[in-house]
Amino acid sequence: MNWIISINGLPCEEDEIREQIKPLLKDKTNLEDIVADIIEAGKHADHDILDFWEDKETKAIWSVSFDEPPTSMVISPVMEVVQRTIDTEIAITASKQLLVDLNDHFVMSETSGFLTVNHDNPPEVEQSGELIKRLMGLGVAAERLEEFGKWQVGAALCALESHHGPDFDVSQYVELTKKAYNTMITSKNTFEAFHLNRYKLSFTHHKEAFYSNLPGDCEERLLMHRCMELCEIFQLSCANQRKLFRYVRNYGVENLNNNVVENWADLTAAQIDESKAEQPSCITNTEELLDRISVHSASKNYLFKLNDKVLRFRGFVDALPEFAEDVICTDDWKRLEGGGRELPIDEWHIEE
């Protein structure tokens, strides 16, 4: 059985594991070996192969979790594959659309789908340039098609599951590789979470937000949606979105809510200056937001409990495992509470 591999709560495909694990490593030369072991561990129930890395790359290993796929997702006989793959069909169809007004000057191979010049009616230089311009736009179209395809997969799975119930088994339509399963389940979960309220952000933004697991978020995921509103307002990249979620996870969202000028993009320079005069700490552009959420904590020594074991760790507070309990900084003897609060620990004195 292939298990779903998650890094810091985010289900990852094989190429994404490498990207997510690399920043967590103490020794970057371990990257390929540890990724290979994580992938291998995902094929077994015990995951013992990762014990080797427990002390060497503690931070990375603690970020990894494994989830069982639903029991209904059993492998069925794969449907017969057509002679020409669907991606080739799409590419040929797209290329034919590009030939509108130019199809008298170019010929498309029925087998390969590639274009050649019609020597019986060759194009002028301007027409050839127009074709190249259109072809260069295929890359942008392909990116948009891929983005739409991820949402469409989620929408289709939700609709078909609702219609067919337990009789619908997606594995009869695709070869159920681990990568295919992860792609399908993340598309389905992400679509379900945002089908009523999508933001002007990429599918990856939505996927990572859904799996962010913000503490204390209610069933309606109001805190998650507030963070997505901020990402949309300031058009944050996925990397900067992670910074925002990490900030909110550690320090709450109240400081941002009280300071963000949400219509900043519509304000004139004079209006922004007026806002700054009234509230010097207000946030009126993306750079100011990033400066606010890029909290660089000092490397300190910590004691904490995890799975009934007392452990110690030196590093940044953000690197502590999510389920750490009774976290104490031994540098200044303060207890860490929710929301990033630090409370002093009373000193005990022997009475003489």
Image (tube, rainbow, N blue to C red):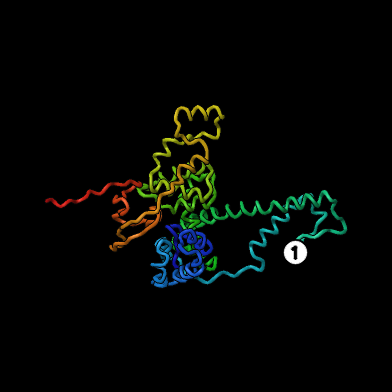
Q: Is residue 223 visible from the viewing direction of this image? A: yes
Question: Which x, y percent locates residue 7?
Answer: 44, 60
Q: What residue type is labelled 1?
A: Glu
Which quarter of the image is occupied by the N terminus?
Answer: bottom left
Residue at x-position 52% and y-position 30%: 272
Q: Which of 166 and 8 is in front in this view?
A: 8
Residue at x-position 39% and y-position 72%: 48
Residue at x-position 33% and y-position 48%: 338
Q: In this view, does 138 lie above or below 173?
A: above
Question: Which x, y percent locates residue 299?
Answer: 40, 54
Residue at x-position 49% and y-position 53%: 207
Q: In this view, does 320 lie above or below 294?
A: below
Q: Is residue 45 visible from the viewing direction of this image? A: no
Q: Which of 56 and 300 is in front in this view?
A: 300
Q: Nearer the viewer, residue 259 or 139?
A: 259
* Residue that sits furthest to the left in the current view: 352
Residue that label 1 marks: 110
Question: Which x, y percent locates residue 339?
Answer: 35, 46
